[in-house]
Structures are given as structure tokens and as C-alpha cells.
Image (cartoon, rainbow, N blue to C red):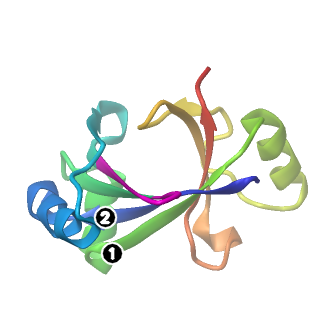
Amino acid sequence: MRKIEHIGIAVKDLEVSNKIFEKLFGAPPYKSEEVQSEGVKTSFFQNGPNKIELLEATNTESPIAKFIEKKGEGIHHIAFDVEDIVSEVKRLQEEGFVVLNEIPKKGADNKLVVFLHPKSTNGVLIELCQEIK
């Protein structure tokens, strides 16, 4: 893992939350998109080298909707940038981590993504991200 890629925050209303983070950072999101396969709309904010992803559920069955129902709005995941997602998944599995999707899938912000189950990472959902080239 090379660096923290972003921190994902689950929100009930993306429009309302965008306004809050625009005030916080003094700038609008640099990107907004919908990832239909995950049932989510996202906005990305950049602050120096740091990125924040806001996530709003687009249906009641999405992972974000279920997270908010259980825990309310808040930090949903921490994403790490990796150079080779396939070899990193293999390495982490050998170390005993539970991988939620062994085959990388297309995520937001032009990334391939894999998630590690929170039960193997002290309760924190970890996302591995590799830039799609």
C-alpha cells in the first residue's frame, strides 16, 4: 500500500452534504458520479493531497443504505492506493485477511476496487484502489 487514497463518508443526502463540505474546504467537489452496480452516488473533494468521498445510497438495498440504517451517517471506509491490486489481494489473503470481492471491480473515480471485511481489520472497512490505466 502506497498511501491513503481517500476516506469514504456515508451520507443521507448528497446535496446537503456537498454544501457542508464545500463550506469546509472552500471549494466544490471536483467529481460527482453514480456507481449503479453499488447503488451509490458519490462526490469527491480534494484538500491538499487528501481526498474525501461522500456516498449516498440510491436504493434501500445498497451497502450504504444498510450502513446508515445500522450506524447512521459517518465514516464508512478508508481506501488505500495500491500499485498491483491482484498481487496485493493475494498477499493480504495469505496474511489472513478476509476479502469481500476477490476479483477487482470498477469503482468510482476511475479505480479498480477490492474490499477487506471489517471483521479482519479491527472493525474498519478497508478499500484497496488501483488507478485504471
Q: Residue 54's spot in the image, x, y percent?
A: 30, 57
Instruction: Give the magenta part as a residue range.
Output: 43-50
**From what the image shows, is residue 124 above or below residue 93?**
below
| Residue at the image point whose x is 68% and y is 57% from the top | 3
Is residue 39 or residue 83 the one in the foreground? 83
Mark 2–mark 1 CB contact (< 8 Å): yes
Q: Is residue 24 left or right of residue 8?
A: left
Q: CA distance from mark 2 to mark 1?
A: 5 Å
The single residue placed furthest to the top in the displayed view is 133
Is residue 20 or residue 11 the one in the foreground? 20
Q: Is residue 130 left or right of residue 61?
A: right
Q: In this figure, which residue is indicated by the disc labeled 1? A: 74
Q: Which mark is residue 47?
A: none
| Residue at the image point whose x is 26% and y is 74% from the top | 73
Q: Secondary structure at mark 1?
A: strand
Q: Is residue 49 magenta?
A: yes
Amino acid type shown at disc 1: Gly
Q: Earlier in the sequence, mark 2 or mark 1?
A: 2
Q: Is residue 105 left or right of residue 56?
A: right
| Residue at the image point whose x is 60% and y is 32% from the top | 131
Q: In this figure, which residue is indicated by the disc labeled 2? A: 10
